[in-house]
Image (cartoon, rainbow, N blue to C red):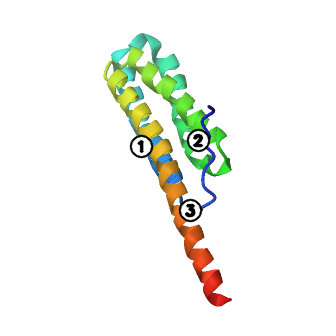
Amino acid sequence: MALDLTPSPRPHGAQRMFSATTLIVEAFVVFFAVLAAHQLVPGDRATTWIWGVVLVLALLACSGLLTRGAWPYWLGIALQIPTILLGLQVTAMWAVGIGFAALFVYGVLKGQQLDREKDAVDQKVWAQQDSAQD
């Protein structure tokens, strides 16, 4: 069974809000982890900054692309891997990265469920309004 992450057409759906919020907060945490890694791993500063800045920009871009279908949600899930791997330089990021990954996946799935339920309620209300007008 394939997992369908196609978002609701609603402009401010719960899935989009939960996911975008998680990605933006995660981008800030990654940036601060890169600052910490700058001091903790002085031999790899160039690698740390390149990896960190690219990851921060990717997280921010992904949060802005969530209106474009299901693929940005899959991209967001994939971006959790380099966030977790930042634990190679900042040990706390193992736990923080896993926490953000769990939070993102939960937000995507629960938000999709809430949007589906709200869409169903909207359809019933619109059908009642249409039948009342006739």
Mark closest to the chain's N terminus, 1 or 2: 1
> What residue did someone put label 3 on?
119
> What residue did someone put label 2 on?
62
Which residue does the image show at 67% across and 47% down from the upper left? 69
Which residue does the image show at 36% across and 31% down from the upper left? 99
* Residue type, mark 1 in image: Val
Residue extending furthest toward the top: 43
Label 1: state its secondary structure: helix
Q: Residues within 10 Å of mark 2 (few under 14, many from 20)?
A: many
From the viewer's perspective, is 131 left or right of 24? right
Q: Quadrant of the N terminus?
A: top right
Q: Residues within 10 Å of mark 1 (few under 14, many from 20)?
A: some
Calculate the distance from the C-alpha at mark 1 to the C-alpha at mark 2.
13 Å
Which residue does the image show at 59% across and 61% down from the upper left? 10
Q: Which mark is residue 25?
A: 1
* Residue type, mark 3 in image: Asp
The image position of residue 42, as x and y in percent, is: 39, 14
Label 2 near label 1: C-beta < 8 Å?
no
Mark closest to the chain's N terminus, 2 or 3: 2
